[in-house]
Image: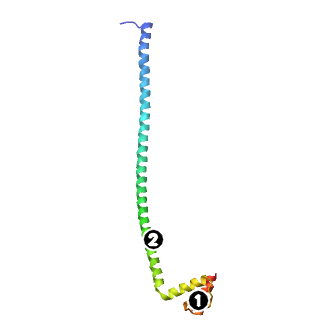
Amino acid sequence: MLAPTADNLILVALILLPLVVLVVILLILRRQQRVLAERVEKAEKTAATLADEVRRIAHQQNEDQTRTVVVTKHLKAIEAQQTQLENQMREVKLQDPAMRLYQRAAEMAKSGASIDEIMQACDIPPAEAELLVSMHKR
């Protein structure tokens, strides 16, 4: 067997030193790889959670838009019914001769006609003519 000489020891040390450094570097890289893999996994979980939240919000927004459309249709239908009812009321008022007289009396009072003029033109009692004049003078 060869006796270890200083040259042999230096040679062995020079061969082993890069191997030891390489092993240490590999250990450090593996540790960094694990840390990075954990970060990537955490980021993927966060991304999945955010994607779920975005889908949920989009679904909620679609539901809200649908509700808005339905409510808008109902409001338009109600407005149409209201307009129709108002028109029917106008027609009924115009068909009722007494109402026509009182509307004419009110218009005359607004335009400044006297109580006597209103009584003669619309054939209403003096008290009602006075009431109309006093209401429309304000």
Evaluate whether residue 128 shows in this view: no
Residue 118: mark: 1
The figure's colour scheme reads rainbow
Neighbor class of circle 2 (other Cα within 10 Å; few <14, some 14-19, many 20+) is few
Tell me the SS state at disc 1.
helix
Position of residue 18 measured from the top left corner of the image (x, y, whole percent) = 43, 17
N-term mark: 1 or 2: 2
Which is more toward the observer, 81 or 23? 81
In screen coordinates, is 114 left or right of 12?
right
Evaluate whether residue 116 shows in this view: yes
In screen coordinates, is 133 left or right of 59?
right
State how far apart marks 1 and 2 are (Cα). 37 Å
In screen coordinates, is 106 left or right of 51?
right
Mark 1: amino acid: Ile
Mark 2: amino acid: Glu
Q: Nearer the viewer, mark 1 or mark 2?
A: 1
- Look at 43% across and 34% down and name the residue there: 36
Question: Label 2, on which residue?
Answer: 79
Position of residue 22 measured from the top left corner of the image (x, y, whole percent) = 42, 21
Q: Is residue 27 above or below residue 135?
A: above
Residue 26: mark: none
